[in-house]
Amino acid sequence: MPLRIANAAGFLGDNLDAPRLTVERAEVDYLTLEYLAELTMSILARQREKNPRLGYAEDFLTVLVSLVPALTRQPRLRIVTNAGGVNPLACAHAAGAVLVSSGLSSRRIGVVTGDDLLPRLFELRDAGCRFVHLDTGEPLADLAQPIVCANAYLGARPIADALAAGAELVITGRVADASLAVGPAADHFDWTWDDWNTVAGASVAGHLIECGAQVSGGLHHDWQALNLADVGYPIAELERDGSCVITKPADSGGAVNRRTVAEQLVYEIGDPAHYLTPDVDVDFTTIELAETGDNRVAVRGATGRPPPDQYKVSLAYHDGYMASGQLLIYGNDCVSKAHACGEMIRRRLARTGLEFAGWHVECLGAGQAVPGLHAAPDGVREVMLRVTARDSRREPLERFTKEFAPLITSGPPGIAGYATGRPQVRPVFAYWPTLVPREVIDTQVEVRTAREWMAEKESP
Amino acid sequence: MKLSDLAHARSGDKGNHANIGVVANDAAAFEQLQRHLTADRVGEFFRGLGVSRVERFELPRIGALNFILYNALAGGASQSLRIDTQGKLLGTAILDLELPDA
């Protein structure tokens, strides 16, 4: 019997109904929910700075409430998620409270920690970790700006350990996306971790489903015929040998075919001969795809080698502020008018002594969304003017956000689109791609009942 | 002919770099891509992005090519001032690329 793993969240902000619909429409052993990206980690870290009980994917709590009927109906359904973000313990406390209030207080929640290096950066630096920037070669000590978050990408082992210890819901922080599927498979089939081809196969399955509907019709070239409004989220049916079939729930929209799977296989990869995870170095060039039925694609032949001896680190630092505003510019001279409006905003700010480290004007609709590809089409009657500014200081950007509305009365005729109010200033996070030796990472797995996690939240 | 006659594509970000996976419609189309869809041609097509270098990888069993466009995103997800901070449009854009017929 294959192990059926569905993934029904591909990022923080994905459709909130997808997890519930997936388990209503299909019988699966595992539901995984993937929420983290580099930018997401920074945003969650900012939330934790403001409130030490936050910093996880709060959407997950909404999803968990929606899953209560399914969890009650299918007591063997298990969930693995990286919703813990930069605060997996707080996520477990909140998830425990949700389960207790839903009558599931004895369900066991496993929490994986140890990825968060922020409290350990000085200690690790003193121990000789230089956290060299992978592109520039600079050591982290040369960075002047404050660090927002630093998390090692953990692998599948702690997830498998939590499941082996009886966890029915596993909450992690920064774990490699593909590992969310590898952990359950390794536990279920009792794989040894150096069975590289098998672990590689499961990693490919994890890679294919990690972005949710992107493998089952979302983003697909032939989207028109696919009923994406009701798109089904993917299921990987994993075999003991690491091969899998990618499919989706019956009675759902979207499609799983050779073309949708091939597109997702090459999504956000580098060298296909070395897809690196903390678990394995996967060679995608040996993979073969075959359609074996209606919305069923078999994925076989992945090969693997030992993974690198260092973990990748998601490290971000504060790098100033940014804001972006838009106005709709109408008329047969709309392109030149839009550029003139952008220049008026710039000159009015310069008049008050404000200049910006970064300034970018786009006329969307005039061929500028991908710079340099297309000239403005003839006869264009309207464009969206988008002006974006960036600076190390917040105050000039706050003033920048106030220079769009005045154009409604003091600029050219034919401007609309100010009803949504002033743009928001947001912090900019920059990335410091780096590595950390495996041996300094201290991974912890704690498994307790929902009741126990909730009680810990209430204790001072 | 246009690339859209031979293939479909998907793009995304890797920090400040973009990747574009191009999947051929069939084996004959893949041979055409191998011959004509060179890293140089893709780099020339996207020169307006400020790409510093393009690297091409092959997945012959899938009939796909993967392109890495280095420094294509003017800063990437958090830092880019462009509307397409993550290179999501590039997979659609590349299908307009003109290729020799033979």
Image: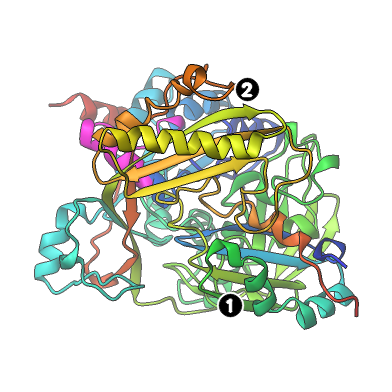
In this rendering, would B86 be left or right of A117? right
Res A371 → quadrant: bottom right
Read off the magenta span: A41-59
- Give the label, 2 or 1, closer to the camera: 2
- Give percent across and percent down for residue A66: 54, 24
Q: Quadrant of the N terminus of chain A?
A: bottom right
In this rendering, would A88 be left or right of B64? left
- Give percent across and percent down for residue A82: 42, 46
Foreground residue among A458 and B69: B69
Foreground residue among A153 and A184: A153
Does A47 appear in magenta?
yes
Q: Chain of mark 1?
A: B
Say which amino acid is labelled 1.
Glu
- Give percent across and percent down for residue A172: 37, 47
Residue occupying image coordinates x 23% and y 28%: A457
- The reply to the same-chain question for discs 2 and 1 is no
Residue occupying image coordinates x 16% and y 52%: A119
Which label was assigned to residue A331? none
Q: Chain of mark 2?
A: A
Q: CA distance from mark 2 to mark 1?
A: 45 Å
Foreground residue among A397 and B64: A397
| Mark 1 lies on residue | B55
Density class for disc 1 (Cα within 10 Å; few <14, some 14-19, many ≥20) is some
Does B11 appear in magenta?
no
Q: Quadrant of the C terminus of chain A?
A: top left
Q: Secondary structure at mark 2?
A: loop
| Mark 2 lies on residue | A414
